[in-house]
Each structure stands twice: as structure tokens, then as C-alpha cells.
Image (spheres, helix red, strand yellow):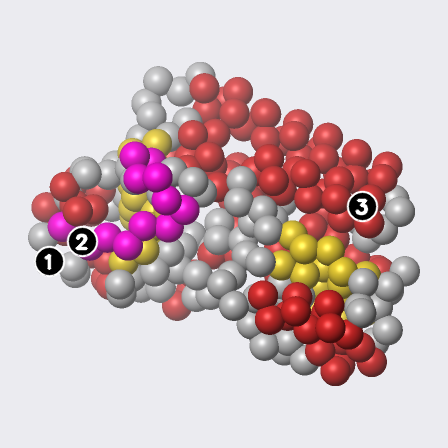
Amino acid sequence: MRVISLCPSNTEIMEFLGLTELLVGVDDFSDWPESIKTLPKLGPDLSIDLDLVEELKPDLVLASLSVPGMEKNIDGLKARGIPHIILNPQSLQDIENDLHLTANALNMPERGNEAAQHFRSRLDAIKQKGAKTSFKPKLYWEWWPKPVFTPGRINWLTELSEAAGAVNIFKDVELASVQTDWDDVSSRKPDYICIAWVGVRRQKVKKELITGRPGWNEMDAVKQDRILILEEELYCRPSPRLLDGLEKLHRLIHDI
């Protein structure tokens, strides 16, 4: 089968299924695994070149609703009669379900079963370790600095925090994404500051941009240098690679 992925998390699901070789085109932001970098690029995820998608004659397009504005891609696929499925995972369980959904759509249900089992076993292994830790640090996650956005309760980073044996300090807010300010963050007294700015490479984030904020030099997380500049691709995309991020987070916050 000829498959096209329209966002990075979908491309990463194909890799987790062991089916990357079926991909014949991807969006501009898909950057992993290495093997997809030579594939035709179809434009940014919010502005896919549907003429090129059609030219590639896909048997299946993996569309997404993970970012507002992607609806027009799906409208275009429908208008052209291009076969597609829509993935929109909001939780770790959704990601596990999408492994089944994608594999079933490719007529390879056994791949989905194997991948979902592997996903669940890795997740459960870290959860068991996290449950045994006596210190449950409070984490402040930041995925955009101006204005400040952080994940609320309805978000995989809250799940990830708990699985690692920690707590998201904004888990009391019943939203997927919370717009807040520096004073609110400071008042919640996080033990760790976890920076993963969407679309920004870790190497471009300078720690002084965090430590220089008004009043933040009084925060214990800053005084003790508990500022984690993390790979956005391991924390901001709803794909199985979140497990890599989870395992790394567990090591970092528990000094393993």
C-alpha cells in the first residue's frame, strides 16, 4: 500500500508499527525517523499541497486534527475522494487506540496488536517505577513563553507526569491548554520547570530566558537549577515517542 502522513505524530505511529516503508510522502514537519527525510514533502501541516497528494496516488492518507486549522486538509481529501483516516489523540490511551486504528486501516491488524502491547508494557513499566517513588515533584510544563501556555488536566503531559511519579501543577484546570502568567506559575511553587516549546529545537532555548523572568530567581526550582530544557519532539507530539520522553523524564526528576 501507498501511504501518506500529514503530520509528524502520524509519521511516528507508522514507525512504531514498523511500516515506515509504506510511506510515499509526508508533511514538511515530519523529521523522524531518518529514513523518511528523502520522501516528497507535501507542505506544512496547516497548508498541505493536495494536488501533490493526489499525484502520489495514495491508498491511504493519515490525516489529523491535532492542530486547529487542519480541518481544511480533511475537507480537501473528502472533496477529491482520497481515502483517509483521521487521528486526533488527546491521551496515552488514544495513542494506543490509534495504533490499532491505523494498522486495521492498512489491513494489518496483527501489527496493531503487537505495537499496542509493546506500548502498554513500556508505559506500565514506568508507571510501576513512578508509583514506588516517595518524592512526587511538582512540575511546571511550558510549551509557549509569550503568552504563557501550559498543559491542563486534559492533556497527555499530565498523564506523563503522573506516570513518572510526579504532578503537573496545573492539573486542577479542566483544559487541555491553559493560558497563564509568570506570577501564577511562581505562586504554585514548582519543584521542576520543564520547558518544551512547540516547534522550537531544544538547542535554541537558552536557560537565561527562564531564569531572568521577574521574581523567578526566588523560586526554589530556579535556585536549585531544576530547569529542564527538553526535546519538544518527545513531549509535544501525541505519538508513541512520548514513551521515550517519559522514560527520560523519570530518570531526570528522580536522579537515576
Q: In the image, what residue type sits under mark 1? A: Pro
Q: Is residue 93 visible?
A: yes
Please name whichever residue, 62 or 12, is drawn nearer the observer in this view of the structure: 62
The magenta span reads 171-183
Q: Residue furthest front?
A: 79
**Quadrant location, the N terminus:** bottom right
Please name whichever residue, 26 or 250, is drawn nearer the observer in this view of the structure: 26
Asked if 90 appears above or below 45 in the picture, the reply is: above
**Quadrant location, the C terminus:** top left
Q: Residues within 10 Å of mark 1 (few under 14, many from 20)?
A: few
Q: Is residue 46 magenta?
A: no
Q: Is residue 228 visible?
A: no
Q: First in sequence, mark 1 or 3: give its number.
A: 3
Foreground label between 1 and 3 = 3
Please name whichever residue, 66 or 114, is drawn nearer the observer in this view of the structure: 66
Q: Are marks 3 and 2 in contact (CB under 8 Å)?
A: no
Residue occupied by mark 3: 103
Q: Secondary structure at mark 1?
A: loop
Residue occupied by mark 2: 182
C-alpha separation, residue under disc 3 versus residue under disc 2? 43 Å
Percent position (x, y) of residue 42?
68, 77
Number of numbered markers: 3
Q: Are marks 1 and 3 in contact (CB under 8 Å)?
A: no
Q: In the image, what residue type sits under mark 3? A: Ala
Residue occupied by mark 1: 214
Q: Is residue 173 magenta?
A: yes
Percent position (x, y) of residue 56?
83, 76
Q: Secondary structure at mark 3?
A: helix
The residue positioned 79% from the left and 39% from the top of the image is 112
C-alpha separation, residue under disc 1 versus residue under disc 2? 8 Å
Q: Residues within 10 Å of mark 3 (few under 14, many from 20)?
A: many
C-alpha separation, residue under disc 1 versus residue under disc 3? 49 Å
